[in-house]
Amino acid sequence: MNCSVKHIFWLIFLAIFIGIASPSISQPARTANSQVARQAILRNYSRLEFMVRGQRRVLGSKTFLRVFTQGRKLEVWVANNASVYRLVRTYRLCSPSGKNARTNIPIGIYSIARTGLQTTSDNFLRLRTNYPNAFDATRGRGQNPLFIGATCVQGGGISLTDTDLEELYVLVYAALANRHNAVPLHIFPYELNAINSMQPRTKSNRQIIEQLTPIYRAFESNHRLPNVLVSRRGYRLEAPRAK
């Protein structure tokens, strides 16, 4: 066997080895460029891949996040090839600390793009949302960005434990690394079903809850993510796009 043949043989062997050893989507270093992010992906990727497969879904498929501020929970939904979502994970949000502590989580329709995969200067993971959106700006909100972070000591915003945030980061990373432009994030005060329709509403949130209710119920009816138009006037449920 001459040198050129040996060289080709080893290149083929190396390509096969890398293909077997690599995850099914792009390598962590291509999307998450910090050491702490790469370590989180390596620690959690295989386990989460197995967990999602147990729900008859594939890690890296279209992913949707839903938050309930009063219930203090964050849900992770993953879609199949027919775009039908299934709940694969639920995380408990940290409670506000202090006797008079209050949450500062807005309600509305948001998303997390690839640029939202971030690491702080203190080497903590975080996910940045696209808050404020056009509607928030019209209402004079959004002086500060909205992050999902591991800030349980303070208990403000969308905060999780370090372990839960690592998992969530990898679940969002997997979807974004698999060529999905963004991960939708819907934030509701509570389940906007008929049972809760008589929940007290303030003057400031009455309009937005009325707009969010049909969006919540549309997803609950078939577990397909509805088309939502976000504008300066608020949120409007749109008819499904023609296939």
Image: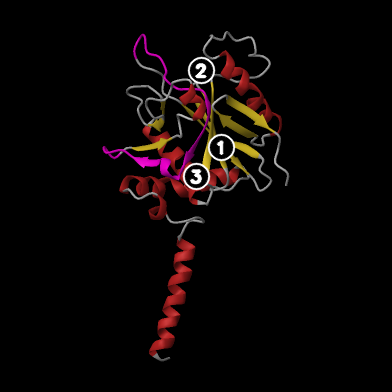
Which of pointers 3 and 2 lies earlier in the amino acid sequence?
3
Crowdedness near tag 2: few (<14), some (14–19) or many (≥20) residues, C-alpha within 10 Å: few
In the image, what residue type sits under mark 3? Answer: Leu
Distance Cα–Cα, label 3 vs label 2: 27 Å
Identify residue type, mark 2: Gln
Which quadrant holds residue 184?
top right
Q: Is residue 69 above or below residue 226?
A: above
Residue 144 lies left or right of residue 92; in this view the side is left
What label sits on residue 166 in the rendered view?
Answer: none
Whole-percent x, y for residue 18 in the image: 44, 65
Residue located at (54% from left, 14% from top): 205
Highlighted range, magenta: 98-123
Q: Residue at the location (35% across, 50% down)?
A: 33
**Label 2 – label 1 distance at C-alpha:** 19 Å
Residue 64 — which label?
1
Q: CA distance from mark 1 to mark 3?
A: 16 Å
Query: Disc 1, disc 3: CB below 8 Å?
Result: no
> In the picture provided, is 205 more to the left or to the right than 95?
right
x 43%, y 72%: residue: 14
Callout 3: SS: helix
Q: Is residue 14 above or below residue 207?
A: below
- Tell whether label 2 touches label 3 (CB within 8 Å): no
| Quadrant of the image occupied by residue 121 | top left
**Which residue bears the numbered disc 2?**
70
In the foreground, 50 or 22 = 22
**Mark 1 residue element:** strand
Q: Is residue 176 visible?
A: yes
Residue position for label 3: 48
